[in-house]
Each structure stands twice: as C-alpha cells, then as structure tokens.
Amino acid sequence: MKIIPAIDIIDGKCVRLSKGDYETKKIYHENPLDIAKEFEANGIQYLHVVDLDGAKAKTIKNLKTLEILAAKTALIIDFGGGIKSRQDLKNAFSAGASQVTVGSIAVENPEICAEWLGEFGAEKLILGADCLDRKVKISGWLTESDLDVLDFIKDYQKNGIQSVICTDISKDGMLQGPSFELYTEILKQTKIDLIASGGISSIKDLEELKNIGCSGAIIGKALYEGNISLKELQKFL
C-alpha cells in the first residue's frame, strides 16, 4: 500500500482544513517545500498536492508551488484542485505532476473526462470521489451533486479509470478514523485501485486499510499533529 502524505495549499502555504471547511484553515508550514523535503528524507516516495484556492476558484491557482515541489524533490506527485480544461491538465503535467486528480469536472462533464482518459491514458488520471453521506461533492466540497459515490466510481470504471481517491468528508481532518465500511463496499463491488483519504489517525488505521485491500492511503493532519510519525511509517515503505 502506498503511503501518500498530503500537502494542501492556500496562498502558497501548507494548510489543513476540517471537513473541508475553509473557515477552519490551520497553517502548518509557510513553505511547502520544506515539509516535502522532510518527507523525502524519510523515505517517502509519493505526494498528494491539492490546490485549495484552485478548487474554490475553479481554476489552478498554485501552479508555481507545484513546479517548485516537482523541481526540487524526486517525489511522485499527484495534483488536484481547479482542473477544468485540457490546458489545465497540460499545465499541471508540464509543472511536474505525474498524475492529475479530476473531481468536479468528472461530475460536470464526464464526456470531456472520457476524452482525456483516451488522450492522456488511464495511468495519468485519478478520479476524485469525495462524498458526504454518500453524495459526491465538488468545487472544493462547496457544492453537492445527486450522485451516489459508488455509482459514480462504477460509471468511471466502465470508462477505463483505474485509480480513485475517495474521501469521506465527514471524516476529513477529524482524526477519528477513516470510512472503513464505505471502502470495503467499494472494493467488493469494483476492481479499481482505491486510495483512502480522510480521517486516518493512527498506524492501526493504516494497517486496517491495507488489510481490506486499499492500494494507497493519503495522510494529512495525523502527520502534522504528530499522531503518526514519519519513523512509524517506515514499516510501510
């Protein structure tokens, strides 16, 4: 199982939110590169970067930060937030992202996402399936759709998607454990590579996610608050 620390960016700074609420913003690092280098120095290979400004504005806002992270580390970066057009995708890849997460656009314009899967390849795109009470939410989690998250994932599996990041928003940033039941249901009914996100609070949570079959786990606040140490993660690397 891949261990994937998260760097969420507002105004070029590394922050965390609780349940996606921008009013709960807490700044952890003024310079995201410093924390990315610390991850890399401790054997981490992957990094999940979210442009929270971009998610809200519906266009990429922190491309320069992505460029710096990609240029000055060897981390394999997946990037999301504000991806609305083919040019956005190209810009993210040009800035150094290895993969791009499509969330809002995947809900609003599935035809375009199907085209992108054909053009860029399924290995380059990750489906962002973020939900609250099973309903997919978009635009920085500010807008709710009427899509059930499992149906949403199944539809994209038919279109060739291979990897999905699924966040249960009610768990995000709360340090109370991830949504094991939801992930188990998704894994039983699909054949996608599921990356768990939201609520991870301990090494025990990571062990359980690995046991149920998740291919990756995104860790945010648990690292920044010290609930999980980089040293403890060595057993997964």
Image (tube, rainbow, N blue to C red):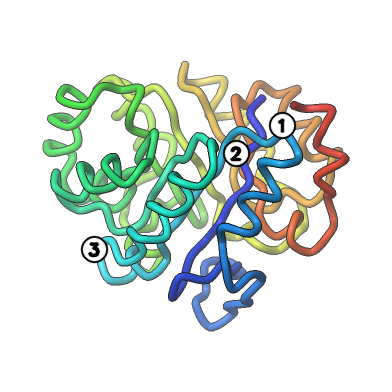
Quick one: 64 or 206, which is closer to the camera? Answer: 64
In three-dimensional space, the C-alpha distance between marks 3 and 2, rounded to whole angstroms, equals: 25 Å
Q: Which residue is mark 3?
A: 59
Quarter of the figure that contains the C terminus: top right
Q: Position of residue 119 (x, y in %)?
A: 15, 25
Q: Quadrant of the N terminus?
A: top right
Image coordinates of residue 212 in percent, x first then y, are 70, 24
Pick whichever, 205 or 13, lies toward us: 13
Look at the numbered discs 3 and 2 and tell me whether their residues touch, using CB distance below 8 Å: no
- Image quarter for residue 145? bottom left
Q: Is residue 13 left or right of residue 79?
A: right
The alpha-carbon separation of the residues under discs 1 and 2 comes to 8 Å
Q: Is residue 168 left or right of residue 56?
A: right
Spot occupied by residue 158 in the image (x, y as percentages of width and height): 28, 20
1 and 2 marks in contact (CB < 8 Å): yes
Q: Which mark is residue 196?
A: 2
Q: CA distance from mark 3 to mark 1?
A: 32 Å
Q: Pointer 1: what residue?
A: 209
Q: Residue at 63%, 29% (x, y): give it.
A: 2
For residue 94, say whether it is visible: yes
Residue 160 on image: x %, y %: 28, 20
